[in-house]
Image: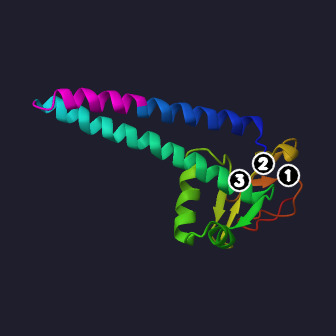
Amino acid sequence: MEFNEETKILIETKKKIGRRRKIIGVILMVSGGVLLAVWVGILLLVVGIFLFGAGCGEDIFIKTFKTYYEIFSGNQTYSISQLAEETKSSEKSVKSNLNNLIRDQYFPGAYIDEKNNLLVLRKEMFPENSTSQTASCRACGAPVETGGPECAFCGTPFK
């Protein structure tokens, strides 16, 4: 599986953040365990557990991203129903995952086309397409391929 340079940097950054959260979480859990008799110890323990969980969550996000990315295999649009079927997940779960991945910039410039139940990706996500240019739709603001006849999201014609 080949990622473009921007995506490689993002994954490495997210891995580092996850590792740091886990390390700090363990340190706080141990410190909290030692000071358990004091309310500060309980607070440290709770914060440590939270940070460790957040670090593990980042690992899960990266794994989910890589799974989806591999399934997309260079397609700029992909059916959410089909993605749910291929990952043996519910559409609701897949949409939630995609919204979180888009929010956290795993799929920069991507959006969910609710009308057609599609994930729409930038072509630059895939190394073989990294030279194409995109613009934003003047009506809805969605990223659109330059030179296309209309916005794939709202249908506004381009002139």
- Residue type, label 1: Thr
Residue identifier under label 2 = 135
Q: At x 42% / y 42%, what residue is drawn?
A: 54
Residue nearest the observer in this picture, 152 or 100: 100
Query: In terms of secondary structure, where does tag 1 sit?
Result: loop
Query: In terms of secondary structure, where does tag 2 sit?
Result: strand
Q: Position of residue 26 (x, y in %)?
A: 35, 31
Instruction: Report crowding for label 3: few under 14, some 14 to 19, many 20 or more residues within 10 A (C-alpha).
Output: some
CA separation, marks 3 and 2?
22 Å
- Residue type, label 3: Tyr
Front: mark 3 or 2:
3
Instruction: Kindly check if marks 3 and 1 are in contact, taking CB atoms under 8 A apart as contact.
Output: no
Residue identifier under label 1 = 146
- Residue type, label 2: Ala
Residue range corresponding to the magenta coloring: 23-37
Q: At x 66% / y 48%, what residue is drawn?
A: 107
Residue 141 seen by the camera: no
Instruction: Report crowding for label 1: few under 14, some 14 to 19, many 20 or more residues within 10 A (C-alpha).
Output: some
Left or right? Give the position of 50 relative to 114.
Answer: left
Residue identifier under label 3 = 69
Q: At x 52% / y 66%, what residue is drawn?
A: 93
Instruction: Kindly check if marks 1 and 2 are in contact, taking CB atoms under 8 A apart as contact.
Output: yes
Q: Position of residue 18 (x, y in %)?
A: 49, 36
Q: Relative to residue 11, is residue 1 depicted above or below?
A: below
Q: Position of residue 137 (x, y in %)?
A: 74, 55
Residue furthest left as drawn: 37
Q: Is residue 31 magenta?
A: yes
Q: Relative to residue 68, is residue 47 depicted above or below?
A: above
